[in-house]
Image (cartoon, rainbow, N blue to C red):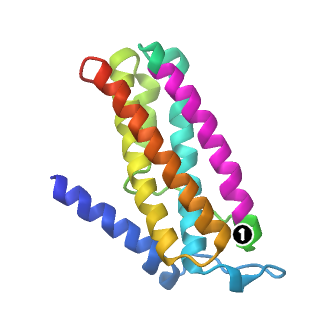
Amino acid sequence: MQRRRHVLTLWSACVVATALPAVGCTPQPTAGASPAAFNATDSAWMLLMIPMTERARLLTDLAPPRTADPALAGFAADTGSTLRADLRRLRAVLRLSGVPDTHPHEGHDMPGMVSRSTLEEATAANGPAYDRILTDALRAHFTQSRMLCAGERTRGRGDEARDLAASLAKSAAAQISRLDTLRAARTPL
């Protein structure tokens, strides 16, 4: 099962790096942009990271009345703030690239993305059940984000996008470390 998940994760990273531009999921820059500074990988990466980050933020926003653990509530609050800042930065670089925010992944559930069904389950859960949903979904989100950022850093061309990918990957690694510390400090979630 672990190998299957790893293969799916690698597949999705390859899709962002190569296939999405080929099948037309990546809009082309609008007039006035500098298309030479960004390539299709940059566009695909940003257009995937935005909905992934939005969904993770929605999950963290549910935490205050639902989590049973004050430390996890603090983590969710901090993570929500970080995700909001990440969204502002992603959208700023997307605007700079000239690619319109067309939401090509609207309604999609991809590896690492908090699914709509996960959000529904989280909305209905409280206490330890919510805590498990939150920690599992955020760990998957940050793990996938790091992989997608690595693909962007390797295959992207826009310096702003590649720099942002490096920053987001570093932040995701820190979030995973903090999450793992929280999980280890409590009874198994």
Residue farthest along the right direction in this orientation:
32
What type is the residue that disc 1 sits on? Pro
Report how many numbered discs are placed on residues in the image: 1
Q: Quadrant of the C terminus?
A: top left
Depth check: give the residue in front, 146 or 115: 146
89 in the magenta segment: yes
Disc 1: CA contacts within 10 A as few (<14), some (14-19) or many (>=20): some
Identified at 44% across, 33% down, the residue is: 120
- Whether residue 89 sits left or right of residue 7 in the image: it is right
Residue at (76, 68) in percent of width and height = 96
Relative to 67, is 13 above or below?
A: below
Q: Which residues are magenta?
A: 72-93
Which residue occupies 34% across, 36% down? 136
Residue 179 higher or lower than 153, as above or below: above
Residue 114 visible in rendering: no
Q: Is residue 120 above or below residue 86?
A: above
Image location of residue 99, percent across then percent down: 70, 72
